[in-house]
Every structure is written in C-alpha cells, then in structure tokens.
Amino acid sequence: MHHRTVGDLMTRPVVQAPRDMPFKELVALLAECDVTAVPVVDGEGRPVGVVSEGDLLRKSSGQADPSGLLPVPHLEAWERAKAEGARAEELMSAPAVCARAEWTVVEAARVMSDRNIKRLPVVDETDKLLGIVSRGDLLRVFLRHDDAIRDEIERDLLRRTLRLAPSAVTVDVREGEVTLDGSVEARSLVAVIVRLCRGVDGVVSVTEHIAYGTDDTGGSALAA
C-alpha cells in the first residue's frame, strides 16, 4: 500500500519573505502571487515564522475608526506590537510550526488541528524550507477515484497483504465510501480488514457485512 506523503502534496517552489521585508511589500507579494500567507525565512533559508493576511489585517483593525462610530479596540500587548509592526519579523506568527516531507497526511492534519493553523512550511533535515502544505493540499487525497481505491483494497490489501481468495470479500466504493461483503475464517480478521481499509488514501468511511466462521476474540460463539 502506498500512502501519499506531505512531500507528494506540498507546493513548491515556495513564495517566501525575508525577515526585513516591509509591510507594503508583503501586501503586494500576497496579491501578486495569489496566496494568503508566506513563510518568513532567515538568511539560511530556514523558516522563522509565517505572515498571513490575518496578521497584516491587524494593521487596520488595530486603528481607530475614522468615522468615530466604533470604539478604539482593546488589544493585548502582542496584538498591539503586531498592529504597530512594519517588517515581516514584527508581523509574523512565530515560531514557525513546520512539517517534514516524509510525514503522512494524518500526521500533518493532526498538527494543523491541534495548533489551529491552516498551513505548514515543509523543511528538510537541516530545517531549510522545501515547500508548504495547506489544508486544501491534504484534502486532495479525497479526490482520488473510486476505482483506484477499490483496486488498491482488492489487490494490495486483501490479496497481497492478507492473502484472501478473490471470492472471500467483495469491495464496493462510491464517493470514497467503502462497503465490504463476504466471509472470512476468523472474527478477528474482520477488524483488521476494516482498519486497513480506513488507512487507504481517499477512503471516507468503511461499512462491513462480513460473516466469520470462528469467533477467536473471546466474544459470542455465534457467527455474524
């Protein structure tokens, strides 16, 4: 089974900014390159932070309303520092939370979720910038065709890995939703099949209707 990694899905080359890039140049860079954020790198090409549209917008949101209708917003010290910043290193969110090219989609997705961030700079073993991966990049695995998902489950998982006969378990895939029917010798194998299917790139859900001949799990002796 082949799982696409962050290195397979990341965008490269990467639009990036030096630490001393001025505010207006950052705004122009995002607009010209049609991106919403860029890694900020040091002189060695190592990410030290990420500056996004949200970071830059604090410049406007932190100011008094010209009409006088809105109250002056209360900002924490770090928010005020960003609102008053003029260069990338003063505006960026730091430190940079980075990924490795060999990470799986699951690893990258968990870091994004845990840290509530939308993108990860990807670095090599020396921490130099290789690419950038976004939430949208990770979701691309779910664009995989149903036929490709079914073929991988049948060929690589059921036949090569588990050594099951072609007639033992049938596989139907519709919009990434996998349905398994058939029968196997032992009940414990059912859970193994489901777990492996869930790990296939592009699988949204797995439903099984698999009977078994022997209950080797210590549960009911009745067949499913």
Image (tube, grey):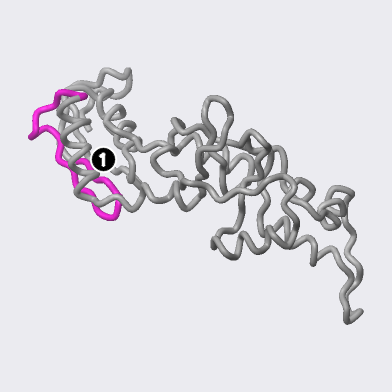
Check if residue 208 falls in the magenta segment: no
**x and y, in percent, of residue 167 in the image:** 8, 34
**x and y, in percent, of residue 73 in the image:** 88, 64
Most extreme residue toward the front, as rendered?
Answer: 43
Q: Nearer the viewer, residue 137 or 168?
A: 137
Q: Against 126, is 207 above or below? A: below
**Mark 1, residue position:** 208
Q: Which residue is located at x 61 percent, y 36 percent?
A: 45
Q: Nearer the viewer, residue 30 or 177?
A: 30
What element does badge 1 sit on? strand
Query: Taking 18 as reference, is 136 left or right?
Result: left
Q: How many marks?
A: 1
The image quadrant where one finds the N terminus is top left
Q: Which residue is located at x 59 percent, y 36 percent?
A: 98
Q: Residues within 10 Å of mark 1 (few under 14, many from 20)?
A: some
Tell me where residue 96 sits by quadrant.
top right
Check if residue 176 falls in the magenta segment: yes
Residue type highlighted by circle 1? Glu
**x and y, in percent, of residue 97 in the image:** 63, 37
Q: Nearer the viewer, residue 93 or 158?
A: 93
Query: Taking 142 as reference, is 181 left or right?
Result: left
* Magenta span of residues: 161-180
Q: Which residue is located at x 64 percent, y 38 percent?
A: 47
Query: Taking 213 as reference, is 14 left or right?
Result: right
Q: Which residue is located at x 79 percent, y 48 percent?
A: 90
Q: Against 8, is 195 above or below? A: above
**x and y, in percent, of residue 61 in the image:** 80, 65
The image quadrant where one finds the C terminus is top left
